[in-house]
Image (tube, rainbow, N blue to C red):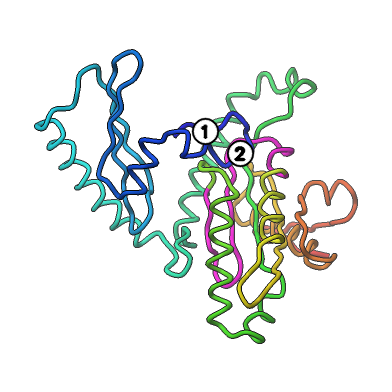
Amino acid sequence: VEENPDPAAAGEPLEAYPALASCIQRHAPSAEVVGADGTHTLWLPIWIGDSVSSCLEIVRPAPFDGAVLQVIAGVVSVYRNFQNLLDYSERDSLTGLLNRKTFDDQLAKMLQVSSDYEAMRAPVIEERRHHTETEKQWLAVIDVDHFKLVNDKFGHLYGDEVLILIANLLQSSFRSQDRVFRFGGEEFVVLLRSTTLANAYKIIERFRTNVEGHDFPQVGRVTVSVGFVSISALEAPVIILGRADQALYYAKSHGRNMACHYDELVSGGLLHTIESNDTAEFF
């Protein structure tokens, strides 16, 4: 499924591909369609548990005969089993989101992407600065407001249900290229790939308002606070996380249910930091 042209969109609706949507709904192993130009497209959803993690698309000019389909099905089966083994070790058991252990690897990869991108655009950065807003990688730290009160008032069973629903809203609100993690307790982290500050705000606000407008069974209204910061290969991971945490702390100490951008807080004189080695303290 192709990405929506809107850089803040969660992705093009599956309904745009009715044959594939029907295949997934029926839990069918594959779907084949013939294009107007006579090309044959075969879709094979890769199931991880009860959900589709990805979809293999094969295009060829001739129909897929039985022998070809048998070979493809065998390869897909091996790949699916391998993915299930990997997925089990990388996922949080309660929410199904990526876990803390996986975050380190994903952030390292994103820092490498940032390093390559910054090196590539360095010669033209001055020329483009006044014409287009720069696309960056972003890290957002999310915390469920007053979550301890939910557990105290309704019990841990309902608390777990809130976390599962928050995880679902995270997955539906952010884009397919973003990565969502449960960090532990009621804290989540999102890595947003290649977007502008305006779009990062738009995506994060979409999630925040989706949570605010959701009716949580028995609990009712739940809100979240968010702190986010741009990712630079020049900064250590602990500094990046620390800055996002400071923006989150500001949001939680100034009314909650809001998203705060670290650099804007600093430039506005609302946040002052003292950085020493691997730590950054909030004042």
The residues bearing labels 2 and 1 have C-alpha atoms spaced at a distance of 8 Å
Along the line of sight, the residue nearer the viewer: 248 or 124: 248
Residue pushed farthest left? 67
Identify residue type, mark 2. Ala
Instruction: Report the residue at 53% width, 81% height from top.
Output: 157
| Highlighted magenta segment, given as a residue range | 179-201
Along the line of sight, the residue nearer the viewer: 132 or 281: 132
Mark 2, Cα crowd under 10 Å, few <14 / some 14-19 / many 20+, is some
| Residue carrying label 1 | 3
Find residue 210 and report its horizontal and vertical position in percent.
Answer: 67, 55
Q: Would residue 187 appear left or right of 226 to someone viewing this image?
A: left
Q: Which of the 4 image quarters holds residue 71?
A: top left
Mark 2 vs 1: CB contact within 8 A: yes
Q: Sequence-wise, which precedes: disc 2 or disc 1?
A: 1
The image quadrant where one finds the N terminus is top left
| Residue carrying label 2 | 9
Mark 1, Cα crowd under 10 Å, few <14 / some 14-19 / many 20+, is some
Residue 183 painted magenta: yes
Q: Which mark is residue 166?
A: none
Along the line of sight, the residue nearer the viewer: 102 or 41: 41
Main secondary structure type of the part rendered in magenta: strand
Secondary structure beneath dot 1 equals loop
| Residue 181 drawn above or below residue 64 | below
Q: Would residue 276 appear left or right of 95 to someone viewing this image?
A: right
Find residue 248 and report its horizontal and vertical position in percent.
Answer: 73, 61
Find residue 283 and report its horizontal and vertical position in percent.
Answer: 84, 65
Secondary structure beneath dot 2 equals loop
Find residue 230 and report its horizontal and vertical position in percent.
Answer: 68, 44
Q: Which of the 4 image quarters holds residue 214?
A: bottom right
Instruction: Report the residue at 35% width, 57% height from top.
Output: 87
Identify residue type, mark 1. Glu
